[in-house]
Image: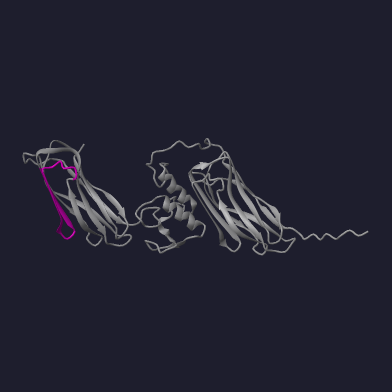
Amino acid sequence: PTPIIVADDIIISPGVPFTMPLTMRDFYAPGIGALTLEVSFDPLVISPDGCDPDPDGVFDTAICNPDYAQGVMRLTFLSTVGVVDSHPLADLRFIGNGGIGDHTGVAINIVTLTFPDGVPIPSAAAVDGSVALDVLPGDVNCDDATDAIDAMFILQYDVGLLGASQQCPPPPDSIYEPACDVSGDTQCDSVDALFIMQCEVGIPNDLCPGTTALHLAFPPFGVTQNANITIGQGTVQSQGEITIPITAQMIDSSLGAATLEVRFDPDVVRPTSCEADPDHRFDIAICNPQFADDVVRFTLASPQGVTGDAPLANITFTAVGAPGEMSDLDLDPVTFSNPDGEAIPHQIASGRIEIQSLRIYLPITR
């Protein structure tokens, strides 16, 4: 292979310090005796913050000047016996001082490259790098990491507990919404949280296609995925409480992400509490009983999928209407997908709450 000197491609948030590795690869014997190179960049996008040459200590001498010129670092390396194979040359430290969307190339100019006897090394090449000031896909809290915390915040946003912001870092009680859609469906919902969680545990998807795959028990090709979603019903005395279960029966399918809304008549019943995933079969589950005046919304996600009969939530209502009144409980699955993010066909059985009529018992007279 051709010997090369390589700079990385990096995506980083504005204002954040970062390190760009500079490496030598596939240098054959007798190896590098003398090397001087310049690294050029746009100083309006990134500014130098230091340089650590020869981190492995394989050269006799290694010197770096991060402020050689505006927008230029210069490095030099010497070895009397020659350095072969692949090694890190330097860790170049920068700070992103531009704004989101700014971009700069990181160009490598090889000034000197010789064997230990001073003869130039033929056919060696430089592979330039780049820096893009942006937010990592899924990094909705702008902390330069996409992890389970982001998945949790996305689910909180999905049920209305957090708002959306175009600012990075976002203000309190918000997420940076432009970083949310990692599934590519133009939505910010539980599927995006699911994909982030899959990457966290090594399951490949569009966000992390190179991740080591785990064996998942998905239905065989050609089998129609299906599910039944049922919401309970019952009667309750006026001013009394009743807990209504919502369950899913997964038929030849596994549930990876779900966001569901339960609609009711607020003049008849009011939600007082909600427990998503009462059997703890999902990895993350959040419920907001005050999503709207007439809506409870909850969301769940499991990277590997949940099969069989799955309790999704228990919602407790207080009867505020008059005896004899009823409220339908209508279920709307906003998202209902398998671990690949594909929608699962489903059937819904709605529920109802009825407030018991008053019964007057008169004494029996003889």
Q: Is residue 192 above or below residue 69?
A: above
Magenta: main secondary structure equals strand
Residue toward you, 118 or 172 = 172
| Residue 289 lies within the magenta run | no
Q: Residue furthest left?
A: 117
Image quadrant holding the C terminus, namely bottom right
Percent x, y of residue 267: 66, 64
Q: Is residue 205 above or below residue 177?
A: above
In the picture, measured across the screen, residue 70 lies left or right of residue 17, that is left
Q: From this viewpoint, which residue is outermost toward the right? A: 366
Quadrant of the drawing holding the N terminus:
top left
Residue 116: name its quadrant: top left
Residue that extends furthest to the front in the rendered view of this protein: 366
Report the side of 33 relative to 211 (left or right). Answer: left
Residue 4 lies in quadrant: top left
Residue 193 percent location from the top left of the image: 46, 51
Report if residue 66 lies within the magenta region: yes
Q: Is residue 164 above or below residue 244?
A: below
Q: Position of residue 77 (x, y in %)?
A: 12, 46
Display colour scheme: one colour
In the foreground, 17 or 71? 17
For image coordinates 89% across by 58% down, the residue present is 364
Can the viewer see residue 273? yes
Magenta stretch bounds: 55-78
Question: Is residue 26 visible in the rendered structure shown here?
Answer: no
Which residue is depicted at the point 68% across and 52% down?
233
